[in-house]
Amino acid sequence: FTMAFKTICVDHIGIACADLDAAAKIYTEVLGLEITNKEEVKEQGVATVFIPCGETLLELLVDITENNDGPMGKYIAKNGPGIQHIALRVDDIKAATADMQAAGISMIDTVARNGAGAMKIAFVHPKSAGCLLELCQPAATYVD
């Protein structure tokens, strides 16, 4: 099976947090890293900060829904804080989602959607990948 896309690198590791500010302090004050981006993704019910660590980003995520019942709130309620997903950057997310489906991989998103950090994203079901896997492509390079 030949894929029509290229996997470039680990883009980021998503870490579910109960308290975004408290979690961020560990990375900034103790580990000496810096936050480069903070944003809310209302469609996903999360607030996020990005912290570069070498060539990989750490993405700290917290639920911002009214009753803490968005996807991140549900994840934390079930699993507690911790690594929630690993994101791989691809050069063509449309080809990646199509090829994954053609290969029989179970996708949560069959069409890319907007994510944090100006990315187009699509999630692979953890039953297929062993963990929640996010495919991402910078929106600036995305061709609709």
Image: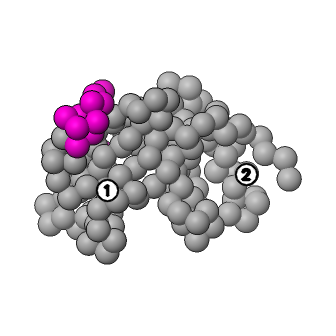
The quadrant the C terminus occupies is top right
Q: Is residue 137 left or right of residue 19?
A: right
Report the Cα–Cα distance between label 2 and label 1: 29 Å
Q: Earlier in the sequence, mark 2 or mark 1?
A: 1
Segment tinted magenta in the rendering: 26-41
> For the residue labelled by badge 1, is the local secondary structure a helix, a strand or a loop?
strand
Q: Quadrant of residue 33?
A: top left
Residue receiving disc 2: 99
Residue at 28% x, 43% y is 48
* Residue 42 can be seen, yes or no: no
Q: Amino acid at mark 2?
A: Asp
Q: Relative to 141, say whether 103 is above or below.
A: below
Q: Residues within 10 Å of mark 1 (few under 14, many from 20)?
A: many
| Circles 2 and 1 in contact, beta carbons < 8 Å | no
Q: Amino acid at mark 1?
A: Ala
**In this rendering, which labeled residue sits more in front, label 2 or label 1?**
1
Residue at 73% x, 65% y is 104
In reply to whether residue 111 is colored magenta, the answer given is no
Task: List x then y, in percent, for residue 100.
Answer: 69, 55
Q: Quadrant of residue 126?
A: bottom right
Residue at 26% x, 72% y is 77
Q: Relative to 9, say whether 96 is above or below.
A: below
Camera-side residue of 65 and 129: 129
Residue receiving disc 1: 16
